[in-house]
Image (tube, rainbow, N blue to C red):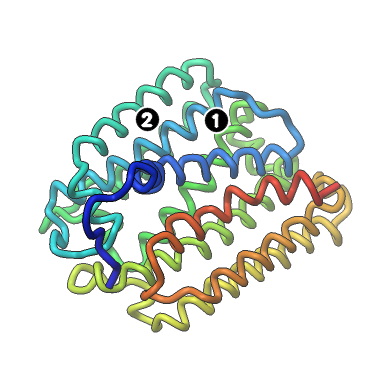
Amino acid sequence: MQPSIKGSPSVATSLFHFYLFGNVHISLCAVALVFSTCTILDFHVRPEWLFVVFGGTLFLYSYQRWIGVKQKENIHYKGLAHQWNIRNQNILLALSVAGIVLAGIAIFSFSKQAWFVVLLTGFLSLFYSAPILRGKRRRVRDIGGAKILMIAITWMLVCIWIPVADKFKPSLVQVFSSEFSYVWKWSLVTFLMIFALTIPFDVRDIEFDKGVLRSLPMRIGEKSAVRLATLLLLISAIVFWRFESNIVHNNFPNGAWRSYVLWSILAIGILSRCNSKRHEYYFSFGIDGLIILLPFFLALIGN
């Protein structure tokens, strides 16, 4: 059970909760992953990519939480984030609008290939968030196992393939050619990383999800889920090392794998302490914040 907010929070606490639960933090994480992608794939960042990724993430996360509140999901659940969402429905709606406007303004300069990726990820995200399935108006995220998979795929597309599609404007045939093999390698590493970092949130939500879906931690146990998350991070580091160190003409900057391995060690150390009794800040600020640290590791230690 997550702790509830008692009394009136201070101004600093209120601002922090807005930053964290208003999805500004997770949106900056997506921006950080775009910077990491540009470092690994060795090209300059366009500001428009950052605006679209930040605005799109802000919209999708705020909209998804607004939908959850409107559906009156577990209104008695005492988690900090959930109770903040219930009390601040109008703020979530305003952030959704602000995010889509910001992304919409920036996207007009994109190539048609980047537009295709944006529309694809938008469709996947709305399909994930909106209550469009038959029966009890369920969402894809309410299906056990689909939630983490959809998140990992969407983050990979947004933070890697939007910049790649806009910069190189490849045809569909080119995308699957050897010319873009190094992009797919980084995509695999990123997919494994995001999949691993998403598992702790299902651990956090065990109480919230009871009676709604059978999440991964419910199926295999909380401790086994945490072990799986750390194992996936370890595998992503080994995969990165294998791609860079043992393959000729890998296109990755020399030494980048060392930066990623060191970051993975930090991430594994933090994830290994995960359990459902941890404070909300550990998950929403700490686990997600690992993504913000990644480009700094790559910039300071790589090369």
How far from the left and from the top, in percent, is residue 53?
49, 34
Left or right of 77, for residue 163: right
How far from the left and from the top, in percent, is residue 96?
30, 33
Toward the viewer: 231 or 203? 203
Which circle's residue, 1 or 2, is located before the other in the chain? 1
User: Label 1's element?
Assistant: helix
Q: Residue at x 26, y 47 (%)?
A: 65
Toward the viewer: 35 or 155? 35
Q: Residue at x 19, y 65 (%)?
A: 77
How far from the left and from the top, in percent, is residue 80?
29, 58
Residue 50: numbered disc: 1
Q: Amino acid at mark 1?
A: Leu
Left or right of 37, for residue 204: left
Residue 99: numbered disc: 2
Toward the viewer: 248 or 189? 189
How dense is the environment of label 1, judged by Cα within 10 Å: few (below 14), some, or many (20 and up)? many
Left or right of 183, for residue 198: left
How far from the left and from the top, in percent, is residue 217?
38, 76
Vertical side of 146 occupied by 125: above or below: above
Q: Quadrant of residue 278?
A: bottom left
Q: Amino acid at mark 2?
A: Gly
Q: Residue at x 51, y 62 (%)?
A: 197
